[in-house]
Image: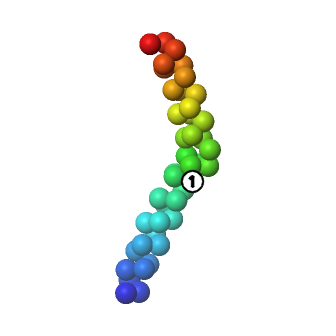
Amino acid sequence: MSKSQNGNKEVKKPKKVPPKPLPAGAAPPTITAAAPPVRRKK
């Protein structure tokens, strides 16, 4: 059980780094800004 928690902690650390900046507010604004221009161009 101790080995399983250690492995999970290492996987959660690197996974939390990339998803942190995206959900921080960079993904929502990017998708919203890309939606209006894409629809207008169409």
Which residue is painted at 42% across and 72% down in the image?
Answer: 8
Residue 5 versus residue 13 in the image, above or below: below
Quarter holding the N terminus? bottom left
Q: Quadrant of residue 5?
A: bottom left
Q: Quadrant of residue 25?
A: top right
Left of 30 or right of it: where is 8? left
Which residue is painted at 61% across and 49% down in the image?
Answer: 24
Which residue is painted at 51% across and 52% down in the image?
Answer: 19
Q: Secondary structure at mark 1?
A: loop
Nearer the observer, 19 or 28? 28
Display coloring: rainbow
Residue 6 versus residue 19 in the image, above or below: below
For badge 1, the amino acid type reads Lys
Which residue is painted at 48% across and 19% down in the image?
Answer: 39
Identify the residue position indicated by label 1 in the image. 20
x, y (%) of residue 14? 49, 60
Farthest residue to the bottom: give it.
1
Q: How many marks?
A: 1
x, y (%) of residue 42? 44, 13
Nearer the observer, 41 or 18? 41
**Dot 1: few (<14), some (14–19), or many (≥20) neighbours within 10 Å?**
few
